Image (spheres, rainbow, N blue to C red):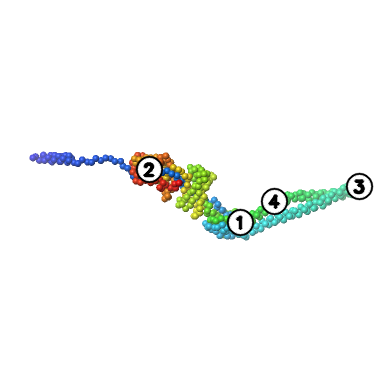
Amino acid sequence: MSKRLFPLIILALGVLGFLALKMTRPEPAEVSATERSWRVSTQIVEPGRHTPLLPLYGQVVAPEQLNVTATLAGRIDARPVSEGERVQAGDLLVALDDADIEPVLTQAKAQVADLKAQLQSEQVRHRNDRAAIKSERAIRDNAARQLERTKALVKRNLASQENLEAATDALARAELTVSARQRAIDEHPSRLQSLEAKLAQAEANLATIERDAKRAQLTAPFDGVVTDVRVAPGDLVARNEPLLSLYPDKNLELRARVPALFRAELLDALVRGETLMATSEGGEHRFELVRFAGTADAAGTEAILALVGNGGGLRPGELLPVNLQRPERPDTVAIPFSALYGANAVYLMTQDQRMERVRIERIGESLADNGERWLLVAGETMKPGAQLITTHLPNAMTGLKVESVGSERSDDKGAEAAE
């Protein structure tokens, strides 16, 4: 055999072997494409009555805070209380030095006594004027008769002209005396009225100083906490100068701004006599919505909430987050925030286990029994028995096949449902 044919023979044998192997190979099993399903958690929808909550951030205030001021000018004699100290009703807060109070009180009493003496003197003067005018009128009449006699004598050349002038001057002086006395009598009512007015003013001033002198020792009118202490013993203070403040720790209020969107709803509830409570984040403090402030601005209106029970560690000026109850809403469902897509959409699971996007109305928030925040929603699509998908899928879309790994009732973890 020729050496040139040997490679061709080997090639032919390889081809025949490949064809034999190909013809004898097993047939592969047919593979059919299957649709993937996503495992999700679901919640059985059961609408009911729920109380939505409104998160607020308010400031604690003391509406009955008492600002103590100095009733009179003087030096601080004692200040037995300190900043933040609790006092009982009747406890001494601050006292002015008696050495600064007594001279002012003595001066006011002396002024009243002086005016009373002037009134008595005026009465005596008036009686003397009434008695003296009778004599002065008699003297005037005698002077008039003497002038007539002198005139008659002058006509008969029995008296000189000087005698006539003297008689005329005597009559003029008598009439001037009577006129002055009469004027004094006529002015008596006005002088008396002026003195009585000055006396009344002095007595009022004395009463004011006596009142302020009694308040020179300032005591607590109620149980409370001392704050804003501005003076120390030995300080010299002016009248009406602030000394310290005192507030009762039981009548505190919380002022929180409520958006205009919720104001009408809350006002209507107050008109109906509903009790709307607010609770702090930790549940230590409770407040009751009692009224709204008289003015508003673009950010909303201040709601005024009264503290219920003991204030504990609350202090005026403290910022406190609370959850305010809104009026109950029927036909609402509490859902976790993970079930929400966008602002107002959720997905329900259909009977063929596919996702269906539906629109809902956001009502507010609620708290679960474990303190977790849930969302209250409503809508025609939230029918009893529907399965709400609570697992948040990034690729969620209508028609996506899902598989439920467990479902819960909507009221198992929903918070604060009404009866």
> In 3D space, how far apart are the residues under numbered discs 4 and 1 (Cα atoms)?
27 Å
Q: Which residue is mark 2?
A: 387
User: Could you tell which of marks 4 and 3 lies nearer the N-terminus?
Assistant: 3
Give the number of the disc on residue 197. Answer: 4
Compared with residue 3, is residue 138 higher up or lower down, i.e. above or below? below
SS type, badge 2: strand
User: Could you tell which of marks 2 and 1 lies nearer the N-terminus?
Assistant: 1
The amino acid pointed to by label 4 is Ala
Foreground disc of the pair 2, 4: 2
> In 3D space, how far apart are the residues under numbered discs 3 and 1 (Cα atoms)?
86 Å
The amino acid pointed to by label 2 is Gln
SS type, badge 3: loop
Q: Which residue is mark 3?
A: 156
- Neighbor class of circle 2 (other Cα within 10 Å; few <14, some 14-19, many 20+) is many
Question: Camera-side residue: 232 or 197?
Answer: 197
The amino acid pointed to by label 1 is Arg
Q: Position of residue 167 (x, y in %)?
A: 85, 49
Q: Which residue is mark 1?
A: 215
User: Could you tell which of marks 2 and 3 lies nearer the N-terminus?
Assistant: 3
